[in-house]
């Protein structure tokens, strides 16, 4: 992977003598101990991760764990005490003031929790702020800002003022303003946390919808696990300044790295997050094609390690699964690939991206593991009842 963002061993201590305190404790950075003996706050401890271009990378954790501190390192509103922040391979600390200003105007922008709109400017002028700072001519920036206002669903409100809009609408303005400068990276610090649940959900939908077309790299901070699971391609979990797990929503749910994460994910509704892909057990099917002799097929059947045997044709398309008992006492002639193909029935199967909630009904009607196929009918493996029960109980 060629990461757009890369953090390498970033630590941050707040206080007057952050360097000295860091040097003194670097081999054993402990938040409580540092605070007790120096009144300095260790906000981040050796944080390293990489973000792939186009991903929504969610950072989550409890209040005070360092989320805002972390995101502010990405536009260098905060300088690390130690470690490096690289964007497109460039260490931000090497940028001159001018380069940094340029970077903030063009490459990255931020959506804030409390909207941060200018109260005396119209919606149109609020959205145009960044474009104006980029040096765009007035006619152009107003027309561009208008486009973004329409895209976030606020057409007609161009000449209103922020206090005439609801919270959800104000945050749409915040989003339009951040997107208008066409940044590669969007930073969103608890951007939806102040909104009512229903509006929050609408905003999440809108963000996902916009993201389909825009394919920005988004760093999204939240303390709401449902939101993290819904939006994140990757989720990073912070605990008291330390990164304790990074993974896809499925990985976090299925393999929590420690009790802290396990407690976090315990009550999550996993039925719509887990998919056949994340529950897949890889199983090699037997191929029935021109080239495979009855003897070879018979041998493959007899040595097949599972009770249900799955078959594909020469194009690797699934053609059916059958219980091993089916072959009991049969002669070698039974294993002619053509006549065997005729005897197989497709039976139930599931598409690889089906969520668990839609798999369950089929699962309960089937006595054997369900074959998992992609749109081209290629066989990827199976999902068994046992695996589903394990995943639900994690
Ligand atoms: N400018 C600062 N000076 C001193 N300490 C700070 C400063 N900013 C943050 N901290 C401390 O660093 C730690 C991490 O704070 P941060 O704001 O990053 O947490 P957070 O995860 O964003 O919390 P929340 O969910 O409440 O927004 C906290 O203990 C906080 O008190
Ligand atoms: Mg915060």
Image (cartoon, helix red, strand yellow):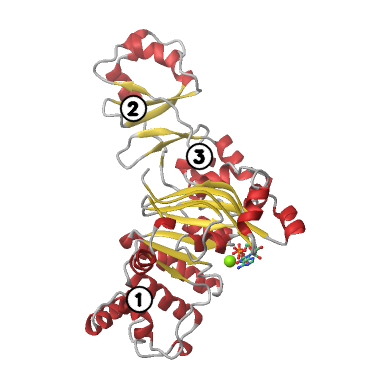
Image location (x, y in percent) of residue 20 = 64, 55
Q: Secondary structure at mark 3?
A: helix
Closer to the camera in the image, 355 or 113? 113
Crowding at mark 3 (Cα within 10 Å: few <14, some 14-19, many 20+): many
- Residue at (53% x, 57% y) in the render: 80
Residue 248 or 50: which is nearer the viewer?
50
Query: Is 74 left or right of 1, judged from the image as shown?
Result: right
Cα distance between the residues tagged 2 and 3: 21 Å
Q: Secondary structure at mark 1?
A: helix
**For discs 2 and 3, the disc positioned in front in the rendered view:** 3
Find residue 220 and name its label.
Answer: none
Where residue 274 sits in the image (x, y, percent)?
51, 47
Number of other residues with Cα within 10 Å of mark 2, as a class: few under 14, some 14 to 19, many 20 or more: many
**Looking at the image, can residue 240 be seen?**
no
Sequence-first tag of 1 and 2? 1
Q: Is residue 382 left or right of residue 224?
A: left
Pointer 3 residue: 279
Seen from the viewer's position, the closer of residues 216 and 133 is 133
Name the disc covering residue 312, or none.
2
Quarter of the rendering containing residue 216: bottom left
Q: Which residue is mark 1?
A: 130
The quadrant of the picture occupied by the N terminus is top left
Residue at left offset 37%, top offset 25% = 311
Closer to the observer: label 3 or label 1? 1
């Amino acid at each position: 992977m060629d990461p757009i963002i890369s953090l390498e061993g970033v630590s941050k201590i707040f206080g007057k003598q952050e360097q000295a305190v860091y040097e003194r404790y670097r081999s054993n950075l402990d938040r409580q101990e540092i605070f007790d003996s120096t009144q300095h706050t260790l906000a981040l401890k050796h944080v390293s991760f990489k973000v792939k271009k186009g991903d929504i990378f969610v950072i989550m954790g409890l209040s005070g764990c360092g989320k805002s501190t972390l995101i502010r390192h990405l536009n260098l509103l905060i300088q690390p005490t130690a470690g490096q922040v690289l964007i497109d391979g460039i260490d931000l600390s090497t940028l001159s003031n001018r380069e940094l200003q340029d970077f903030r105007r063009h490459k990255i922008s931020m959506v804030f929790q409390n909207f941060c709109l200018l109260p005396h400017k119209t919606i149109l002028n609020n959205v145009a702020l960044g474009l104006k700072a980029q040096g765009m001519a007035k006619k152009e920036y107003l027309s561009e800002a208008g486009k973004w206002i329409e895209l976030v669903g606020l057409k007609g409100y161009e000449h209103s003022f922020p206090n005439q809009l609801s919270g959800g609408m104000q945050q749409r303005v915040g989003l339009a303003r951040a997107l208008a400068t066409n940044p590669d990276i969007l930073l969103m610090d608890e951007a939806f946390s102040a909104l009512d649940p229903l509006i929050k959900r609408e905003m999440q939908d809108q963000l996902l919808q916009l993201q389909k077309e825009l394919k920005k790299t988004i760093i999204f901070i939240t303390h709401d696990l449902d939101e993290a699971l819904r939006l994140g391609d990757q989720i990073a979990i912070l605990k008291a300044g330390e990164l304790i797990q990074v993974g896809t929503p499925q990985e976090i749910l299925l393999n929590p790295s420690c009790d802290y994460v396990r407690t976090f994910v315990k009550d999550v509704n996993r039925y719509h997050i887990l998919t056949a892909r994340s529950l897949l057990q890889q199983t090699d099917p037997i191929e029935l094609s021109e080239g495979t002799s009855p003897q070879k097929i018979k041998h493959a059947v007899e040595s097949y390690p599972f009770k249900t045997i799955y078959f594909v044709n020469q194009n690797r398309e699934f053609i059916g699964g059958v219980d091993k008992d089916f072959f009991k006492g049969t002669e070698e002639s039974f294993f002619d690939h053509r006549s065997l193909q005729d005897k197989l029935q497709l039976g139930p199967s599931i598409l690889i991206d089906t969520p668990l909630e839609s798999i369950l009904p089929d699962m309960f009607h089937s006595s054997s593991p369900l074959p998992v196929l992609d749109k081209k009918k290629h066989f990827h493996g199976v999902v068994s009842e046992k695996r589903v029960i394990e995943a639900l109980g994690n």
